[in-house]
């Protein structure tokens, strides 16, 4: 028996101004996207903006439903839009931002487990890493270099 440790490298930015210029643009698009959130149940608005290798920006926001599990997260709206409209174009980077109607979200909002699993598969399929930046409304921005860092020991399709 042996015990191993798995670590997650995380880059932390103190403000949006510290980010590379193209990522700042994605932040802006993600903030715009979250204004289109349909979140009457949680009052929590999430925006996702991803950049494709051809420079195109695809956005998504969370869409809730009175039958709660039928709702969907912003990240999956964005990645599925990209996958269906631009099936063979690689995703290079993704920015996630969130706000609440009830309070200021001042810490980074990281993608949920289901979104990590979904994004992980597209990253594996395209064989190129996806940078993920995530933040709240204000405050620090966290960045990981790959879905592998957010979802270690993932369920992978080769197991099927
Ligand atoms: N949500 C996202 O859009 N992305 C996440 O990664 C976490 C949660 C949404 C789902 C739901 O509409 C609301 O935030 C509250 O959970």
Image (tube, rainbow, N blue to C red):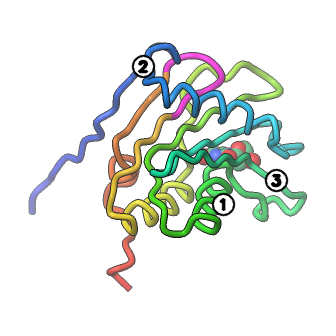
The Cα–Cα distance between marks 3 and 1, rounded to whole angstroms, is 17 Å
Residue 75 placement (x, y as % from top left): 61, 50
Q: Nearer the viewer, mark 3 or mark 1?
A: 1
Q: Is residue 25 above or below residue 17?
A: below
Residue that numbered label 3 is attached to: 64
Depth check: 113 or 26 in front?
Answer: 26
Determine if the magenta segment contains residue 102.
no
Depth check: 20 or 54 in front?
Answer: 54
User: Label 3's element?
Assistant: loop
Furthest toward the left, the residue is: 1
Which region is colored magenta? 134-140
Q: Is mark 3 within 8 Å of ligand 1?
A: yes
Where, by quadrant of the figure, is residue 28 drawn?
A: top right
Q: Is residue 47 above or below residue 115?
A: above
Determine if the magenta segment contains residue 135.
yes
**Numbered badge on residue 13:** 2
Q: Nearer the viewer, mark 2 or mark 1?
A: 1
Magenta region, main secondary structure: loop
Residue that numbered label 1 is attached to: 81
User: Label 2's element?
Assistant: strand
* Horizontal relation, residue 132 to residue 37: left or right: left
């Amino acid at each position: 028996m042996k015990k191993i440790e798995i670590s997650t490298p995380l880059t932390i930015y103190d403000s949006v101004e510290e980010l590379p210029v193209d990522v700042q643009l994605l932040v802006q698009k993600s903030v715009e996207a979250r204004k289109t959130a349909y979140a009457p149940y949680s009052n929590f608005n999430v925006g996702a903006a991803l950049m494709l290798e051809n420079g195109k920006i695809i956005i998504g926001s969370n869409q809730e439903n009175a039958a709660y599990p039928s709702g969907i997260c912003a990240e999956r709206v964005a990645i599925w839009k990209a996958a269906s409209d631009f099936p063979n174009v690689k995703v290079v980077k993704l920015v996630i931002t969130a706000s609440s109607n009830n309070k200021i979200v001042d810490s980074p909002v990281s993608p949920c487990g289901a979104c990590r699993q979904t994004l992980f598969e597209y990253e594996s399929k395209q064989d190129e890493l996806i940078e993920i930046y995530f933040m709240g409304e204000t405050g620090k921005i966290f960045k990981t270099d790959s879905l592998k860092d957010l979802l270690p020991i993932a369920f992978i399709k080769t197991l099927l």
